[in-house]
Each structure stands twice: as structure tokens, then as C-alpha cells.
Amino acid sequence: MSQTLAGWLARHAELPDSDRDFLLCHRLDLDRAALRLNADRPIDQNLWQTLEADAARLAAGEPLAYLLGEWSFWDFDLVVSADVLVPRPETEILVEAALQRTQPGDRVLDLGTGSGAIAIALARSQQLEMLAADASAAALSIARENAASLGAPVAFLESNWFSAVTGMFDLIVANPPYVAEGDPHLPALAHEPSRALVSGPEGLDDLRQIIAEAPAHLDAGGWLLVEHGYDQADAVGNLFAEAGFEALECLKDLGGQPRVTLGRRLPDNSPHGHA
């Protein structure tokens, strides 16, 4: 088989078209339209070997983002590695909902920031006092790099959820692990950090802790927004109600699945308020 663009594409026809195209665009510095126009372009031996190694990693289930070392989110590109989850499009719903409930100067906390995607999107879109926390020092290193390169004013803190967090916030946002142990989708996610994916037998352990502890860190009338699994909306809504949140709402992703639940901490002067 010839060592051309067309030859490589034919050789790896079993891989998803989008993955093959994005990979070639990245390695050859072409756009997708140019790939088809340059189908007969020869590929030198060194690049061919690189692409063959890339194809093997993709065939083994490694996310394309880890091969590229970057991934798009919101309106920017993030550095990513195997120390962080690959940012998902559905998480942009969390960002949109948070922006609708913040105003300039608000103090906002992003729990489990990973690559920094949510915190950076918020800080670039609104003038906020933005704090991003994560239990992983390696993830925080990636997040700091991203914030610096994108000029996003975000402070970072190593903290296992609220363990090292002090002060009060106007809004808290979290995209925590929410996959259940033994979930059939886990083998397909084997290359991503399991600590950022799996959370107990029902996938609710971290969500339960965050929702229960959030009121102590929210100003009266402050908001909590969390991303969760498509089949967890009822359970998460119940956790919000048990923690004393009002104005509960569940937002759907682009596929029509329940994906983000949010609620407001009751004001202290409410008949159901709490300190």
C-alpha cells in the first residue's frame, strides 16, 4: 500500500473517520477539506511511523485528545494529558448556566477542576473572583498551565473537595466523578483517570458529599451547579432537597438527557433557612 494520505486512510478504515481526519490535520497542519484534495500526497517514512503509532494508540481505545495533547472546549483549546479527563461538550451547559447566575465581582468555586476547563471558561467570560480546586497535584499543574497560556485570572488550590477550602462563595460549580463501579462503559474509558470518573456503587458518593457540604460554603442565595449522569437526575435532585436548596432545576444536554442540576441556598431569613 502506498505511503500517501489516501493509503494511510485506507489502511486504518476501521478507526472513526473523525479521529483519522483530526489526527492527519494535526500532524500535517492541514484543514479537513485539504485532506481530500491532497489524497495522493506522499508521507515520508518518519511521519508514516508516527501515524502508525498514533493509529495503534487509537485502536487500543486511547482518546484522540491525549495523542494531540490538546482539546477544544468553549471558545479555546486546552492542554490535556492522561492526568485529566478530556473535556466534554455537555460540560459547556454547566458553564452557560453558571454565567447566567453570576455577575462581575462574584466569588466562584470550581470543584474538581481537572484541566481547568470550567474555571477558565468562566473567568474569560465574566470578571469573577475565580478559585479552582482539585485533589490531584498533576491535574492542577495542567490547569495552571492552561490558565496562564489563556490569560485566565484563576487561583488554584489543592483540595479534596472542600477539605482545604475557606471562605464563602456566590456560586459553586462541580463536574465530579459520577460513574458507578462496574458501569459497562468503563472499559471504553480505561485510558482516562479512573479517580476522575468512578464514585462508588451508584456513582453518587462524590455528588452526595459535595451537595451536603456546599451550603456551609455558600452565601445565602448562592447557587450550586453540578454535572451528573443521565440516569441520576432524580437521586441528585433529592440530595439537593435534603441539603435545603430551593429553585431546583435540571438542564438537559444536546442529546436531550438530564445532565446538570442546580439549586439556590435558601436565604437565612427564609422560614426554611439555615445558617
Image: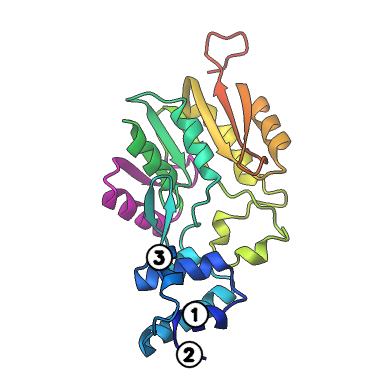
Q: Is residue 248 left or right of residue 231?
A: left
In the picture, residue 11 is in which quadrant? bottom right
The part of the chain drawn in magenta is: 136-164
Q: CA distance from mark 2 to mark 1?
A: 8 Å
Q: Residue at x 62, y 76 (%)?
A: 14
Tag 1: amino acid: Ala
Say which element carries label 1.
Answer: helix
Q: Residue at x 59, y 68 (%)?
A: 16
Q: Residue 65: give its label.
A: none
Residue 32, position in %: x, y? 44, 64
Q: CA distance from mark 1 to mark 3?
A: 25 Å
Q: Is residue 221 magenta?
A: no
> What residue is pinned by disc 2?
2
> What residue is pinned by disc 1?
6
> What residue is pinned by disc 3?
69
Q: Nearer the viewer, residue 180 or 151?
A: 151
Bin the neighbour count of mark 2 within 10 Å (Cα to Cα): few under 14, some 14-19, many 20 and up. Answer: few
